[in-house]
Amino acid sequence: MPMRSKLKVSSFREIKSTFGRFFAIMAIIALGVGFFSGVKITTPAMVNTVGGFMNDHELFDYRIVSTLGWEEDDVAALKGREDVRAAEGAYALDLLVNDKDKNELVFKTHSLTDGVNVPEILEGRMPQNNGEVLIDGKTSFKVGDKFTVSEGNTEDTLDSFIPRELTVTGRIYSPAYVHFERGSTTIGSGKVSGYIYLDKSAFDMEAYTELYVKLDHELEVYSDDYKDYMAEREDSWEKAAEEQADERYDRIVSEAEDKLADGRQELEDSREEGQQKLDDAKAELDDAKAELDDAAQKLTDAEKEIADGEKEIADNEKKLKDAKKTLDDTEVTLVSGKAQLDSASATLAASKAQLDEGERQLRDGEAAFAAAKAQLDDGAAQIEAGQAEIDAQKAALDAQNEQFMSQYGELLGMLDMLPPEQAAAISAGKAQLDSGYEQLSAAQAELDAKKQELAAGQTELSAQQAVLEQSRAQLEAGRAQYQQGWAEYSASLAQYQSGKAQYEKGLRDYEDGKKQLEDGKAELEKGRQEYEDGKEDYEEGLKKYEDGEAEYQDGVTSFDEEIAKGEQELADGEQELRDLKKPDVFLLDRNTNIGYACFENDSEIVEQVARVFPIFFILVAALVCMTTMSRMVEERRTQIGTLKALGYSERAIMGKFTFYAGSAAVLGCVLGYGVGTVLFPKVIWMTYKLMYIELDIDYLFDAKLAAIAGAVAIACSVGAAWLSCRYELSETAAGLMRPKAPKAGKRVFLERFPFIWNRLKFLHKVTIRNIFRYKKRFFMMIVGISGCTALLLTGFGLKDSVSDFAEVQYEEIVTADASVTFRADDSGNMPQELSHQLDGMGAQYACVYTGAWDLVKKDVTKSMSLVAPVDYADMKGSMNFTDTEGTPLDAPSGDEAMVSISVAERYNVKVGDEITLRDENMRVLKFRVKSVFDNHVYNYVFVPYEALGRQLGEQIDINSAYIKFRQGEDVSKAQTAIGKLDDVVSITLFRDLKKRLSDSMSSLDYVVLLVIISAAGLAFIVLYNLTNINITEREREIATIKVLGFFRGETAAYVLRENIFLTALGIVAGLGLGVLLHRFVMAQIVVDLVSFKVRILPMSFVYSIALTFLFNLAVNAVMSRKLEKINMAESLKSVE
Amino acid sequence: MSAFVEFKNVKKTYKTGEVEIHALKDATFEIGKGEFCVIVGASGAGKTTILNILGGMDTLTSGSVRLDGREISKLSKKELTAYRRYDIGFVFQFYNLVQNLTAKENVELAAQICKDPLDAEEVLKQVGLGERMKNFPAQLSGGEQQRVAIARALAKNPKLLLCDEPTGALDYNTGKAVLKLLQDTCRKKGMTVVVITHNSALAAMADRIITVKSGTVESMRLNTEIVDVEDIEW
């Protein structure tokens, strides 16, 4: 149809010539569709990604827990059900380990299961022995890290868990842990650091702690199909699980009964056997006793015999001794006799020798006498001769002396007067004479002595003669005596000879006796030895017997004990069996898994947001299309009339416009859907994956969504075109070709107040009139601009509320630097080592009890952090308790509690309410809420310390302290120093917490940026489009005022002042709307343990306003150039 | 007496791509102060081009244009705007009133921007619309609207009143009345009025008649037998 094709050509030319308008429609549709589909697809895309992971890795459908545990038989039985794909028994426990720095950590510890909860290995490999583990991929632990199982674990845990050294061989994501929250534990610091998976062989337990079932389906998680599927099965499975548990119970009971019966039998058997053994032992002992007694008798006899023998020997010995004595006496006598004899013989011999000597001496003496007599006679003769000579010499000398005296006699007296020579000669002469005399005297003396000697010799000779004669007599007598002695001696010798013979015979007899005695003695000795040996043997036997007896007694005792024990055990067993209750069975579905449940909630947040935002965009898009198209149709009035006059059908004419709008919508829709569904899930997931496993998000094409988006977009644009055309086409061709009556001017409401109206500048009045002249445009501008402002404000407000809360929490509310948990000493106080350390650092600290207690309300049970400071005065400097207005609150006392605002808001707790707290051991505390304090992180309940002990009736140890270090302290060093102490379990710096929170929340910046960009886009498109319409619509008017001589700036102001005014108005509306939208969005964002401060800072208002104006100015700048181009000649043209 | 308006060898060539359109080839004419001048010519003869150039809405290719001794062919864009603003009053064929403003306000719109404007109400009274000042254009008849337009032009107290087919959209009688108003204004106020029209009948009422044909001034003559508006028939 060539005619039709020319119309098409016209349509394409139209698009080309009015591309600005075409683009505006396309862009607003793209933005609307992009935002709508992007936000809408985000939740399904996230669910698809995480849910896909869960399905691919066979997340359990049922986790079945029984108080009795499960055995392989139970697993097999349930596995046999027709709808089961996999069923596996598994072990799980909380394990305390130490890392290489000796920090104590708690791991949720699981056994690996086949075909259900299959982990995704991110790095590393599966464990190959029981000391190798797969570790939580959300933690910072690496492959190769090592841990030691802490001695601090309970006995049970240490018994149930085999390895003591753990080595990480792989990092994983587990479908059972998609959320980063790892729950809490009652061991260690109470904080779970992560999870680990090990081979089943690492566990040593009687029964599986849980049983995982994966049903045979591939249904999408959270889907209604899945929920229906599970609902269908619930009853049947519950029954099956219970039956199986009961079966296990029966099995345990019957097994136990069998065991008890066996035990009883065994006990009886052992009792009998034991008794038998004891009896045998007893008999044996008795035999031994008899034997021993015999031996004792024999020993006694032997002893007696030995005594007798000894006596006999003693007697004989004595006899021998006597005999010996006699012999000895005899011997003595004999010896002395011999000696006598010998001496007699000697005497005799001596006497003989004496006699012989005497004879010889006598003869010598007689000879000597004769010689002496002869000598004496000689001497007498010599003396007479000498006397004669002397007399002669005397006579000669007397003669000489007379002569001399005669010559010199007279002179002798006068010698001195004589000459010397003469005197000397006289003297010499005289001396010669004297010496002669003297010599003569000496010779005379000598002769006299010899005369005397001769006389003595004569005397002696006479005596000698007498002695000689006497000795002769004596010798003769001695000889006679000797003859007699010899005779006597001969007689004695004979006598002696016979005595000696007798003695020798006696001696021989004695020797014989002695030998006999020696033999007897040896024999006795031998007997005695034998006796000793026998005695020893006997004693040994006796000892053995006594030992045996003691053993026997012990045996009897232990036998009794053993039997008693056995009986007790049996009784215990019976008691236990009686006490064994029917098991409680819990059929837990996926909703009990934190990750599964949290993800459903969290992903819904986006869906919540998706409910409001996109409507905004769609609405604006529709309005923009509507205005644009109706303007376009109006502009083409004449053309429509002409076409109509030429005979084109209404449908064909309408087609031209619907094609224009439709093609813009389709292009915009494709563009928007393409960009939106890729970009939005990606950016939003970026923030989510911090809390979840960090998978790459899957692109999800949702044909239904695309169809809806397309349909809405096309309905908006084509519908708008159709409506506008229909109205125009209802006129006749002629009517259409006539100019349309201009819209009449109207007074505005404001003119009723002349005092205001009259004060306005004239051109402002014009502006105001114009604003209210086009209601549709006015409405659109307000919606568009206010939407833009509201979006911006929400975006900035999100950031304000979210990014700041960590700083507020850890700078304004919690002012302490660190919290330390420790093991109290025996008296329940802070360990001394720690308090010394803290005092040494000059730190302030407040001791508290802190623990996880559940707030129990009708329908909810929610874990709270219960904190009980010993003294609230110490908490000053560590924590500020204020209400939301910042007014300080008083400390609770008695049974009062102070709860954090999150608790109050989420669990609807009001001041004055009574709250009930319960711990794992079902201990219960009750408090009346005294006040609600401002707090953003954790659900806190503060109570007085004294109330704990009082309500629970037992001492509650403090276990934690808030620390405020001295100004300027190196906090990290202090942390290390304190962490090293023995009794310190852990120390946390609030600075680190703050950073972690801020970091995780800073990811929201992307969302804020996304919102701001969207808002900017929206604002720009709306403003551009409307201003564009405004200008084209009033081209003639503008040309006229230009002709009138309005300067460039004045012309622009004349038109754009409206924009500015509408923008201002839109902003005012937008701020109100923004506050509401922000509140709504914040209410949708529910993050566990965190309560955001819902607030928008003044600067955010400023930014929102400024940005909106900035967009407006940008549009105005573009538009003023367009105004410039308006030809004044337009004013001369006729009205079309 | 030197000419109040002087067109000298004015040439205007529009270029559209490769095609050159010579709207004015060589136009030369002059108008005296206080004269009622009618420029007549067929469609496409170049009268609108003359109007555009004279009104400061368009520039010329060559030649010179003077108004009251001032060379306007050399003015910048901004000076041209000022020229329009202070020296020229414009009356359009289709009135070109701002629909959103009342009669008085439309007049004020122009008066606002002038150095020495006339009182808007006074002018409206003069054009005979004293009673309808607060009416919006849509509430006025065509003639009344054109009167408002004239009042708007007059209120600026311009040196030259340019009227483009002022009766073009009006019926015969109303057209006459409007022409009468223009003539009266010229006579009573000494205003120099230039009326551009294709209707040569109107020439009879003019002081000076300039005939344009194919981009050139065919003839220019002073009318010695001025006919009153009422007596003109067409």
Image (spheres, coloured by chain):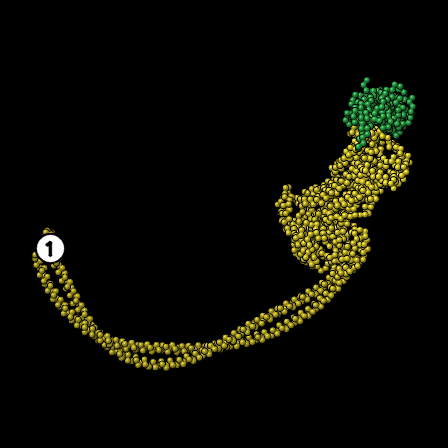
Chain colours: A yellow, B green
Residue A658: x and y in percent read 85, 40
Within the image, what quadrant is residue A759 found in?
top right
Residue A927: x and y in percent read 74, 48
Q: In front: B94, or A769?
A: B94
Q: In front: A796, or A544?
A: A796
Q: Please tell me how many numbered marks the rendered image carries.
A: 1
Within the image, what quadrant is residue A778 found in?
top right
> From this viewpoint, which residue is outermost toward the top?
B1
Instruction: Please state, as top left, top right, bottom left or bottom right, where the C terminus of chain A lies in the image.
Output: top right
Q: Which residue is mark 1?
A: A425
Does the image show residue A875? no
User: Relative to A417, is A137 on the left or the right?
Assistant: right
Q: In front: B95, or B102?
A: B95
Q: In front: B64, or B109?
A: B64
Please name the residue shown 89% across and 19% down the image: B225
Q: In the structure shown, which secondary structural element does the residue marked by tag 1 occupy?
A: helix
Does the image show residue A525? yes
